[in-house]
Every structure is written in C-alpha cells, then in structure tokens.
Image (tube, grey):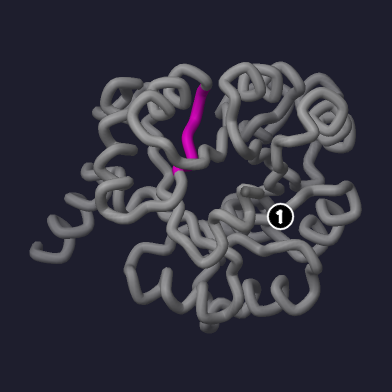
Amino acid sequence: MNVLNQLEKQLVVSCQALKDEPLHSSFIMGRMALATFQGGAAGIRANSAVDIMEIKQQVDLPVIGIVKQDYADSPIYITPKIKEVKELLDAEVDMIAMDATRRKRPDGEQLEDLVAYVREHASEVSLMADVSTMEEAINAEELGFDCVSTTLIGYTSETEGTSLADNDFSILKQLVGKISIPVVAEGKLDTPAKAARALELGAHFIVVGSAITRPKNITEGFAEAIK
C-alpha cells in the first residue's frame, strides 16, 4: 500500500532525541517507537539511520526518515544534502522528509537535485517537504514532492513568533485550500484537541513529537504551571 494512503487520517509520532538530550540512544528510541505503536501510532518519524534501523527492528510501521545535520554555511539542518539522503535510502525508509524552504543549502546544493536523486535511485520512496510558508509549499509541489508538512512554521526568519495553531490553524486552512498534494500537520500540536482539529480542517495526517516523546519538555510544562 502507498505510504500516504496508509497514513491518511492517522497519527505519526516523532521519536527523536538529539545528542544533548537525556534520551539520546537508538535503543531508547526503538522502545519509544514500540510504546507509541502500542498506544495507537500508525507511523514513526525518526532522525538518523542508526535510530531508524533500531526502530524498524521494534515496530512494523511506516518510517518517515530525516537526518539532522548542522553545516556552517547554511541554516538548513533537516536532510540538507544528498549525503544525508543516501543515508536514509540505505536505512530503507518509506518516506524522506527534508527542509524545503528557499534558504541556501550547504555547499550550494539545490533542493531540486535532492528530489531528482531520490526519483532516480528509489522511486518507491515518498518525499515530504518541510515548509514554513505558502510560497515554499507551492514550490515543493512544483518540484514533485508527494506531500508538504508544516514542520518549520515558527522556525524560519519569515515565520518567527508564529505557530501552526494560530488563528484556528489559518495557515493550515490556506495550504489545504491551495495545495493539490496532501498537507501534513506538524509543529506544536501539544494537545489531543489540537491534533483532532488539524485533521478536521483537512490535514492528511498529523505528526506529534515533543508532547509525546520528550518527557523533559513535558515535565517543564507541569513544573512551570504549578509554580
């Protein structure tokens, strides 16, 4: 079954922990994925080939893969280069997500070249464009991405200080009304009610991360609330 059909109207959970986070461990991410599967997740979004391979040992779910990698000459760090794309293809992911903003990529690589590489070498792998604006979403659709995700709203200079859920998900409504390919809702969906509302407004599926898989962040919210 096509992965987009498989995930339609479902919950995907982002199981990630960076090197400076307490849960950074492929073993832990594998068990985190298993816990979310038992809780009803229909797919996993994961960072790095090593985490993805461990997750695939624990759950039989579609995996949306990314590689977060910092480069000195670019602000883009979500699957920024063909090097990271190759890592994900070797890990046999079902979908690759990458930063699809219009910002300069490291070493002068071009977004269209990453798309072309996947289409040439692994046409069965779907492509997700992580975007922050309507312009970026339109460009991603023109480049041949299979879906766009709202992942980067609030994380670019153009969208700083904004959130996916602002004004009852106004940007999601606009994207769904304008973009022909599926629109995925991701970013600060920190309550079940917000997740359900995003689906109600036309999101193809939703991705939830920190609200489920980052206990440090969750604890901070409780601790701050009771002070």
Residue 221 in the image: x percent, y percent? 22, 57
Magenta stretch, residue numbers: 44-48
Is residue 193 at all visible to an observer of this figure? yes
The answer to whether residue 49 is above or below residue 59 is above
Residue at 56% in and 40% down: 64
Residue at 72% in and 71% down: 175
The answer to whether residue 101 is above or below residue 30 is below
Residue 60 in the image: x percent, y percent? 42, 36
Q: Nearer the viewer, residue 151 or 55?
A: 55
The answer to whether residue 29 is above or below residue 138 is above
Please give the residue where the numbered disc 1 appears in the rendered image.
147
The answer to whether residue 217 is above or below residue 194 is above
**Which quadrant of the figure contains the C terminus?**
bottom left
Q: Is residue 96 magenta?
A: no
Residue at 58% in and 53% down: 151
Is residue 160 at all visible to an observer of this figure? no
Query: For the residue labelled by badge 1, is the local secondary structure a helix, a strand or a loop?
Result: strand
Q: Nearer the viewer, residue 195 or 18?
A: 195
Task: Count the numbered circles shown.
Answer: 1
Q: Main secondary structure of the magenta part?
A: strand
Residue at 77% in and 59% down: 137
Q: In the picture provided, is 216 more to the left or to the right than 139?
A: left
